[in-house]
């Protein structure tokens, strides 16, 4: 029954072009993105967007986003986090349903070097407040329907809705802080 599995897998990989070498322009973008973001989850998105910008990255209830669109939205959200002073060592809570907002928030938080704290959308108010306090969350990224819940979690919490962040497709990218180097 599993005899044909290796051949089926090999054919699928070849059809997907996952194993084909990147062209010179794509390779240049791959190297640039890997250097720019360092070693964090955002780099995976940036490298994939450089290689396959028009492929579907996310399909959810709100529609389909290509890798190029997901990258643009993620960078716009990262700009917004950066504008609010979020950076390395800070904790950002993500209170989003499964969908593109959750993915954008995760990658944007990684890009600015902050720590990702996943918050359950089903938390009661006291449980959310305890999680926010316990993890020292200063910013919560959430969708519109969770904004009131997020604001009630703490007095000094900044709340950002990914859907309200202006897209910055033509703006220059800020110089993100370099990833922390470990000292030997």
Image (cartoon, helix red, strand yellow):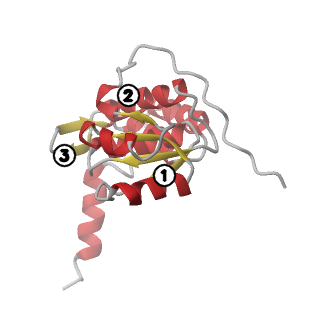
Q: Tell me whether circle 1 and circle 2 mark residues in contact (CB < 8 Å).
A: no
Outermost bottom residue: 1
Q: Give the tally of numbered discs.
A: 3
Mark 3 and mark 1: Cα distance apart in space: 27 Å
Q: What residue does disc 3 label?
A: 60
Mark 3 and mark 2: Cα distance apart in space: 17 Å
Quadrant of residue 134 within the rendered picture: bottom right
Q: Residues within 10 Å of mark 2 (few under 14, many from 20)?
A: some
Label 1: state its secondary structure: helix
Q: What residue does disc 1 label?
A: 132
* 1 or 2: mark nearer the eye: 1
**Mark 2 or mark 3, which is nearer the start of the sequence?**
3
Query: What residue appears at the point 50 percent right and 15 percent down from the top-left corner?
Result: 172
Query: What residue appears at the point 31 percent right and 26 percent down from the top-left corner?
Result: 164
Tell whether 105 sits left or right of 88: left
* 3 or 1: mark nearer the eye: 1
**Quadrant into which the N terminus falls:** bottom left
Q: What residue does disc 2 label?
A: 72
Label 3: state its secondary structure: strand
């Amino acid at each position: 029954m599993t005899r044909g599995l290796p051949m089926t897998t090999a054919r699928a990989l070849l059809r997907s072009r996952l194993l084909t070498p990147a062209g010179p322009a794509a390779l240049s973008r791959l190297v640039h993105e890997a250097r720019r973001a360092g070693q964090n989850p955002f780099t995976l998105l940036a490298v994939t967007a450089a290689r396959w910008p028009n492929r579907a990255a996310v399909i959810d209830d709100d529609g389909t986003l290509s890798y190029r669109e997901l990258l643009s939205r993620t960078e716009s959200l990262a700009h917004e986090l950066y504008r609010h002073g979020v950076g390395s060592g800070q904790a950002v809570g993500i209170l989003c349903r499964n969908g593109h907002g959750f993915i954008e928030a995760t990658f944007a938080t990684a890009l600015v070097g902050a720590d990702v704290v996943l918050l359950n959308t089903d938390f009661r108010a006291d449980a959310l407040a305890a999680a926010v306090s316990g993890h020292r969350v200063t910013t919560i990224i959430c969708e519109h329907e969770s904004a009131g819940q997020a604001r009630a979690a703490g007095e000094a919490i900044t709340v950002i809705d990914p859907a309200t962040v202006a897209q910055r497709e033509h703006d220059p990218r800020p110089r993100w802080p370099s990833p922390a180097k470990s000292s030997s």
